[in-house]
């Protein structure tokens, strides 16, 4: 039996922005991430909820298609329960960040 298991992709990136062309590549990359459903958790850290591992793999493939030629991008895949275990050490957590291991139901 294949049960629903939500996954989070946490994307970290470090892109050069010293020239005009690098800044444009950075802006295109961030715009592409947002278009794919990622949202910013911190500067250079974006996150996306996926309904299962197959959807997460598809999201990684889509990110590969928009990678800038320079810089570094890393993606960490975690379960929703692992993501809910994040400890926020500075400030209050954002209200739009889901920090529960309850299943997401889309109607």
Image: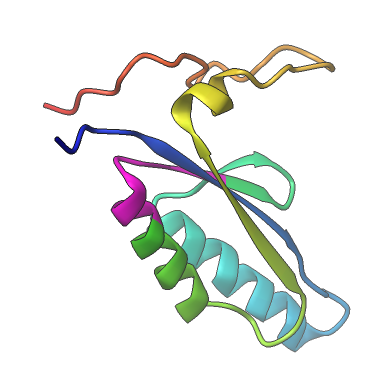
* The magenta segment: 47-56
Residue 76 relative to residue 2: left or right: right
**Above-or-below relation of 94 to 4:** above
Q: Looking at the rendering, in which quadrant would you find the C terminus?
A: top left
Residue 56 in view of the camera: yes
Reply yes or no: does residue 92 show up in magenta.
no
User: Image point 67% across, 72% down: which residue?
Assistant: 26
**Above-or-below relation of 85 to 10:** above
* Residue 47, percent from left and from top: 54, 44
Q: Quadrant of residue 71?
A: bottom right
Residue 18 relative to residue 29: left or right: right
Q: Looking at the rendering, in which quadrant would you find the N terminus?
A: top left
User: Image point 46% across, 28% down: which residue?
Assistant: 80
**Above-or-below relation of 40 to 63:** above
Q: Quadrant of residue 84?
A: top right
* Residue 79, percent from left and from top: 48, 33
Q: Nearer the viewer, residue 27 or 14?
A: 14
**Above-or-below relation of 65 to 105:** below
Q: Quadrant of residue 95?
A: top right
Residue 97 in view of the camera: no
User: Image point 21% across, 32% down: which residue?
Assistant: 3
* Residue 74, percent from left and from top: 67, 61
User: Image point 65% across, 79% down: which residue?
Assistant: 25
| Residue found at the far right of this picture | 18
Residue 103 relative to residue 99: left or right: left
How many numbered tags mark residues here?
0
């Amino acid at each position: 039996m294949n049960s629903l298991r939500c996954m989070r992709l946490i994307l970290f990136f470090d892109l050069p922005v010293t020239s005009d062309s690098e800044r444009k590549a950075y802006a295109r990359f961030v715009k592409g991430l947002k278009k794919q459903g990622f949202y910013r958790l911190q500067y250079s850290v974006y996150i996306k909820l996926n309904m299962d591992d197959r959807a997460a793999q598809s999201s990684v493939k889509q990110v590969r298609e928009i990678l800038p030629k320079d810089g570094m991008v890393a993606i960490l895949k975690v379960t929703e329960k692992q993501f809910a275990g994040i400890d926020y050490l500075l400030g209050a957590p954002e209200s739009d960040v889901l920090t529960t291991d309850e299943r997401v139901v889309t109607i």
